[in-house]
Image (cartoon, helix red, strand yellow):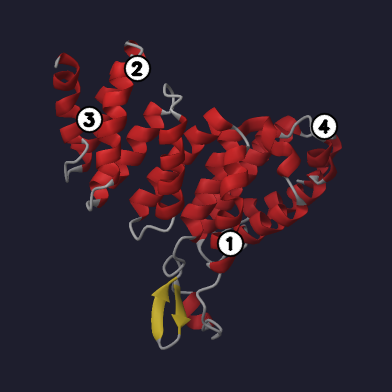
Amino acid sequence: FIMAEVFAGWIADLQDEKHLNRQRGLKLLAVELKKNTPTNETLSYLIEQDQELMGSSSWESLQSAFLLAAELLKYSTDNVWMKQIIEHCHKNLENKEVRVRLAASECLKQLSISQGISVYVEFKDQLLHMITDNFERGDDDEPNPAVESAGLVKHGTDLMHDTEGWKFLETSLIALRLIIEGTGEAFVPHLTHSLLEIIFRCLHHTNRFVREGGFFTVTALCSLCNSSDIFQGIAMEIAKQLAVGLADNWSQVRYAASVATRTFMQNVQDKKIVLFF
């Protein structure tokens, strides 16, 4: 079975404990699919392999399963398999391994490209709840200013770094951004004030990675809303948030805010708003 022999080594690489081997296997497989458009027989074989990876107890194999699925979604129209992938994404957006959650998010982007706004509708409630539910650590104690200045916050009786303890917050925000990017202009009617409030709240979060992710999400919104009256109506509100980000004390956050600001200025119709900056 020639097809199986060609792909068998790459599928084996996808299950390797070493990141570089998994990355190599995925890259070689993706190059082959792009170079030679896969036949239905090839797709059926690879989908079967992907399903086996999805059932693995190894996080490495599960991560690879989502990344492989993202590649196969560029070519497959198998609706039954797509529904299975959607179910796996629902389940693993809360996986304890962050690399699995990120891979599932990448898969959601490709699903959005192929299926459109229906993916956002499917995952909207789950993602927004994961963001709002994990926004706080769940402790009523106020951070000690002296501890916070050292990059630590007081959580109960423990000291915790300000990037820890937020569960799925950052990856949920990334998943939302990737869905927006994959959906494109079809997302515009779903740009509500309640959604903006959630995203804007993330721009002021204690965790700098959440703030960074928030500004990249704003970038995604600005890039697709240039012709939207909705976008133009909230332009000043967005500008105020960007100004705060440009003055953030972390360079990664300032960079993300800078990218968002550039995209914003390229798309806003009222150029007088530049005076705000």
Closer-to-camera residue (35/202): 35
User: Callout 3: helix, strand or loop?
Assistant: helix
Mark 2 burial class by Cα count in 10 Å: few <14, some 14-19, many 20+ = few
Closer-to-camera residue (140/106): 106
Residue 248 lies, in percent from the top left, at 59, 57
Kind of residue at disc 3: Gly
Task: Give the mark nearer the N terminus: 1 vs 2.
Answer: 2
Mark 4 burial class by Cα count in 10 Å: few <14, some 14-19, many 20+ = some
Give the labeled residue for mark 3. Answer: 25
Closer to the camera: disc 2 or disc 3? 2
Closer to the camera: disc 4 or disc 3? 3
- Distance, label 4 to label 3, CA atoms, is 45 Å
- Distance, label 1 to label 2, CA atoms, is 38 Å
Give the labeled residue for mark 4. Answer: 269
Task: Give the mark nearer the N terminus: 4 vs 1.
Answer: 1
Give the labeled residue for mark 2. Answer: 40
Task: Give the mark nearer the N terminus: 1 vs 3.
Answer: 3
- Are circles 4 and 3 on residues that touch, CB within 8 Å? no
User: Callout 4: helix, strand or loop?
Assistant: loop
Mark 1 burial class by Cα count in 10 Å: few <14, some 14-19, many 20+ = few
- Distance, label 4 to label 1, CA atoms, is 33 Å
Kind of residue at disc 1: His
Q: Is residue 2 above or below residue 45?
A: above
